[in-house]
C-alpha cells in the first residue's frame, strides 16, 4: 500500500525498525505515567495509614456500585480496543474504527457516571482540603477527599485524552490510512487506553473497597 | 470458550478469542473483589486481598491486552523497571511512617504527646493531670 513509504521517516532504515522505536518510546512514556500516579498512590497510602478510621468511613460514604460499574465499563472498552487492533492487523480499517468508536462511547459513559458522583460530593460539601464540610471530624475527611479528587481527577483527565487519541486514530482508520503491514498508531493509541484502564483497576479497590 | 466474535475472526492469526477470555477473567475478578469487600475482612488482610486481585487484573491487562507477553525484552524491561520504582516509592514511604513512634514520655507529664499538642494548638482538650 502507499501508506508504508509515507509512514517511514527518512532517518529509519526500515518500517520494522521504526515501529520498534515507536513502540519502545510509548512504553517509556507509559512508565512515566505509572510513576506519576504512583506518587499519588503513595500519598494516599501514607494518609490512609495515619487516618485509618476516617478514611474507612469516608470510603464507605462513596457509591461503590458506581465505581464497580465504571470498572466494568473501562474493562469492556479495553476489550473493544484490543479487538480493534486485531481488526487493524488484518487490514480491516473500518471495523477497527467502529470498535475504537465503541470504546470512546464507553469512555463517555465513564465520564458521565463520574460527573454524577462529583455532583453528589459538591452538594454534600465533600470537598478537598479546607473546603471540606462533611461530617467526619478531624483532618481525615478533608485529606481523603483531597486525594480522592486528585487521583480520580487526574485519571478522568487521562480518560479524556485517551478518548481524543482514540478518536483521531479511528477517523484515520476509517479513511483507510493504515494497512495490515503498517498500523502502529492504532496499536500505540490502544496501549495508552489500556494503561488508563490499568490505573483504574487499582483506583477502584483503593478508593471504593478498602 | 469463545464468543461469536472470536469464531468470526478466527482466520489470519487472530487474538480475538484470547481477548474475550481475558475480558471474562477481568469481569469475574472485578465481581470477586467487589463481593469480598462486603464481608469486611478484618485487619490488613482485606487490603492485601483487594490489592492482590487488582494485581492479577493488572497483569492480565498488561500481558495480553498490551501484549507484554510477546514484546521484545527491552520493552518488558522498561515496564518492569517502572514497577520496581512503584514498590520502592510506596513501600519505603509507608515504612517510614510505620516505624515512627509517638513520644514516649509519661502520658500525664508536660511533655506527653497530648500536652505538646495542646501547647502547639493552644487548646485544652484534656484536664490537667494534677492540681
Image: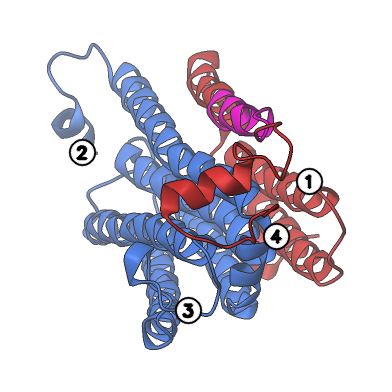
**Is disc 3 placed on a helix, strand or loop?**
loop
The residue carrying mark 2 is A3
Disc 1, SS: helix
Q: Is residue B45 magenta?
A: no
| Cα distance in 3D space between marks 3 and 4 | 20 Å
The CA distance from mark 1 to mark 3 is 29 Å
Dot 4 or dot 2: first in sequence order is: 2
Circles 2 and 1 on the same chain: no
Work out whether disc 4 and disc 2 sit on a shared chain: yes
Mark in the foreground, 2 or 1 = 1
The span picked out in magenta is B88-102
Please give the letter of the chain rendered in blue. Answer: A
What residue is disc 4 on?
Answer: A210
Circle 3 is placed at which residue position?
A: A134
Which mark is drawn over residue B23?
Answer: none
Residue B100 occupies which quadrant of the picture?
top right
Q: Residue at x 28, y 56 (%)?
A: A161
Q: Is residue B60 above or below residue A77?
A: above
Mark 4 neighbour class, 10 Å CA radius: few under 14, some 14 to 19, many 20 or more: many
User: Circle 1 sits on which residue?
Assistant: B48
The colour applied to the residues of chain B in this rendering is red
Residue at screen point 36% across, 60% down: A159
Report the side of A176 relative to B22 (left or right).
left
* Residue B11 in view here: no
Q: Nearer the viewer, mark 1 or mark 3?
A: 3
**Mark with earlier residue (3, 4):** 3
Quadrant assignment, res A163: bottom left
Amino acid at each position: 500500500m502507499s501508506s508504508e513509504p509515507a509512514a517511514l521517516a527518512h532517518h529509519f532504515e526500515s518500517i520494522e525498525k521504526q515501529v520498534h522505536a515507536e513502540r519502545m518510546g510509548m512504553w517509556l512514556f507509559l512508565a512515566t505515567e505509572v510513576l506519576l500516579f504512583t506518587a499519588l498512590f503513595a500519598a494516599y497510602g501514607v494518609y490512609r495509614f495515619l487516618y485509618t478510621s476516617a478514611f474507612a468511613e469516608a470510603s464507605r460514604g462513596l457509591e461503590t456500585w458506581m465505581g464497580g460499574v465504571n470498572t466494568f465499563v473501562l474493562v469492556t472498552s479495553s476489550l473493544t480496543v484490543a479487538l480493534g487492533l486485531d481488526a487493524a492487523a488484518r487490514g480491516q480499517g473500518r471495523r477497527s474504527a467502529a470498535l475504537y468508536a465503541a470504546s470512546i462511547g464507553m469512555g463517555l459513559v465513564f465520564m458521565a457516571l463520574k460527573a454524577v458522583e462529583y455532583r453528589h460530593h459538591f452538594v454534600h460539601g465533600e470537598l478537598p482540603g479546607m473546603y471540606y464540610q462533611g461530617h467526619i471530624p478531624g483532618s481525615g475527611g478533608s485529606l481523603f477527599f483531597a486525594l480522592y479528587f486528585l487521583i480520580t481527577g487526574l485519571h478522568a483527565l487521562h480518560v479524556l485524552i485517551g478518548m481524543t487519541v482514540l478518536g483521531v486514530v479511528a477517523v484515520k482508520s476509517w479513511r483507510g490510512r493504515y494497512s495490515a503491514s503498517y498500523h502502529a498508531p492504532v496499536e500505540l493509541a490502544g496501549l495508552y487506553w489500556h494503561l488508563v484502564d490499568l490505573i483504574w483497576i487499582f483506583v477502584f479497590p483503593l478508593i471504593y473497597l478498602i | 470458550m469463545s464468543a461469536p466474535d472470536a469464531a468470526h475472526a478466527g482466520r489470519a492469526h487472530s487474538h480475538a478469542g484470547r481477548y474475550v477470555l481475558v475480558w471474562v477473567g477481568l469481569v469475574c475478578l472485578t465481581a470477586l473483589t467487589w463481593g469480598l469487600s462486603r464481608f469486611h475482612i478484618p485487619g490488613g488482610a482485606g487490603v492485601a486481598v483487594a490489592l492482590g486481585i487488582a494485581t492479577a487484573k493488572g497483569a492480565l491487562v498488561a500481558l495480553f491486552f498490551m501484549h507484554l507477553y510477546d514484546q521484545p525484552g527491552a520493552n518488558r524491561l522498561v515496564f518492569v523497571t517502572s514497577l520496581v520504582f512503584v514498590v520502592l516509592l510506596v513501600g519505603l514511604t509507608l515504612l517510614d511512617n510505620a516505624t515512627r513512634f509517638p513520644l514516649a514520655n509519661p502520658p500525664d507529664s508536660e511533655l506527653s504527646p497530648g500536652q505538646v499538642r495542646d501547647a502547639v494548638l493552644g487548646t485544652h482538650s484534656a484536664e490537667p493531670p494534677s492540681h
